[in-house]
Image (cartoon, helix red, strand yellow):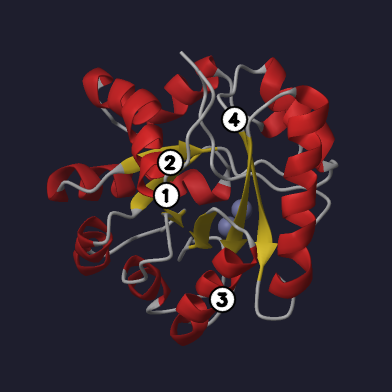
Amino acid sequence: MPVFDFHTHTTISDGHAAPLEMARRCQQNGYAAYVCSDHVDEATVERRVPEIVAACLLASRELGMASIPAVEVTRVPPERVARVAARARSLGAQLVVVHGETLGDYPQPGLNLAAARCPDVDILGHPGLITDEAAEAARENHIHLEISAAGLHGLTNGHVARVAIRLGVELVLDSDAHRPEALLTAERANQVLRGSGIDLATVLKIAADAPLRVLARRGIELPT
Ligand SMILES: [Zn+2]
Ligand SMILES: [Zn+2]
């Protein structure tokens, strides 16, 4: 089964490897596509999105691998998340992840809800102790909630999974890798999802079907 992963970082922001190196490891690990989703905020969106777009073009050309430019809107105040997400999209980001209210950060009350209400957002990343209200808004706006394979961000995976399954919100699994070794493999994906308390049938749905819905919502087609 191909591996999907919408959340990875490179030297364009705070990652430790160049985009091409990350893409190469994705290819080795059986990824269906390489998604480069470096951090952007109001100060960096203008210069980083064109860099991400260029890096994805290079990865496609060099490796013959589908490469999708994306962003992670990070540490932007709730009232300005929608503006940065829209700007990233207009500059060429095809997918938008928002850095949610993870336990690992200083609190940004209202951030999950603001992201979940924003039609330009595709994935609410590591949403911590997400409330029912934010999860329901995500469901209404077809935004996927993230199960995270990254240490601190993954602490609340069990909570996120329980809320999402109870309320019928879609889930995706992402690595949030900042170095090649942290990228997913099929085995690791299965471990993180099962470890989040998710039953096998739902794990298979998250691994195979949910990522295709993320792509289809934006009209992104992968070569078969
Ligand atoms: Zn993040
Ligand atoms: Zn991240």
Question: What residue sits 73% from the left and 23% below the top?
Answer: 64
Question: What residue sits 55% from the left and 64% below the top?
Answer: 89
Q: Amino acid at mark 1?
A: Arg
Pointer 1 and pointer 4: residues touching (CB < 8 Å)?
A: no
- Residue that protrudes farthest toward the bottom in the picture: 79
| Mark-to-mark CA distance, 1 and 4 | 15 Å
Question: What residue sits 42% from the left and 44% below the top?
Answer: 219
Q: Which residue is mark 2?
A: 215
Q: Which mark is residue 84?
A: 3
Quadrant of residue 214 in the image? top left
| Mark-to-mark CA distance, 3 and 4 | 25 Å
Question: What residue sits 45% from the left and 37% below the top?
Answer: 173
Question: Label 2's element?
Answer: helix
Question: Label 1's element?
Answer: loop
| Mark-to-mark CA distance, 1 and 2 | 6 Å
Q: Which residue is mark 4?
A: 33
Q: Is residue 84 above or below residue 207?
A: below
Residue 134 horizontal/vertical position (percent):
27, 67
Q: Which mark is residue 172?
A: none
Q: Amino acid at mark 2?
A: Leu
Q: Nearer the viewer, mark 1 or mark 4?
A: 1
Pointer 1 and pointer 2: residues touching (CB < 8 Å)?
A: yes
Q: Residues within 10 Å of mark 1 (few under 14, many from 20)?
A: few
Question: Disc 2, ligand 2: is the CB inside 8 Å?
Answer: no
| Mark-to-mark CA distance, 2 and 4 | 11 Å
Q: Which residue is mark 1?
A: 218
